[in-house]
Image: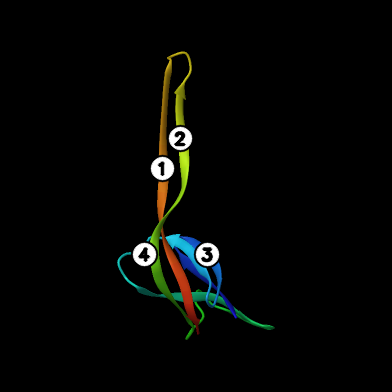
Amino acid sequence: MQAVIVSGGKQHIVEKDQVLELELLGEEKKVVFDALLVIDGDDIKVGAPHVSGLKVHAEVLEEVKGEKIKILKFKAKKRIKRLTGHRQHYAQVKITKIG
């Protein structure tokens, strides 16, 4: 069984026991998402906007950092270069139950 959920303004296709990285969700250990679409074999349920009665339960494992991104700001003919970096923080989430 697969479901489509929304977290952090992005949609994710998830399955049971899948581990994925989402935007930070706060201090909660257990999270419940609304399902936008559920695929169970040949049976497809589409919500408007959510499928009624179906929730996706997840458990937050830990907070992790993403890859480092280098940002270079450069001004031509001024001899100015500035190099900075950024690492986004994510919540590692395991899907425990769909439905």
Q: Position of residue 42 (x, y in %)?
A: 69, 83
Residue corresponding to mark 2: 71
Of the numbered discs 1 and 4, the one sitting upstream in the chain is: 4
Q: Which one is nearer the viewer's eye here, 52 or 77?
A: 77
SS label for mark 1 = strand
Residue 30, image x and y in percent? 37, 75
Q: Is residue 50 left or right of residue 38?
A: left
Residues under labels 3 and 2: Cα distance?
27 Å
Distance between mark 4 and mark 3 Cα atoms: 15 Å
Instruction: Tell me the residue that label 3 is attached to.
Output: 11
Q: Position of residue 67 (x, y in %)?
A: 48, 48
Residue type at tag 2: Ile
Q: Tell me whether circle 2 and circle 1 mark residues in contact (CB < 8 Å).
A: yes
Q: Residues within 10 Å of mark 1 (few under 14, many from 20)?
A: few
Report the mark closest to the observer, 1 or 4. Answer: 1
Q: CA distance from mark 1 to mark 4?
A: 19 Å
For marks 3 and 2, the one nearer the N-term is 3
Residue ID for mark 4: 25
Residue type at tag 3: Gln
**Residue reaching furthest to the top:** 77
Residue under label 1:
86
Of labels 2 and 1, earlier in sequence is 2
Q: Secondary structure at mark 4?
A: loop
Q: What's the distance in space between the residues labelled 2 and 4, CA to CA?
A: 26 Å
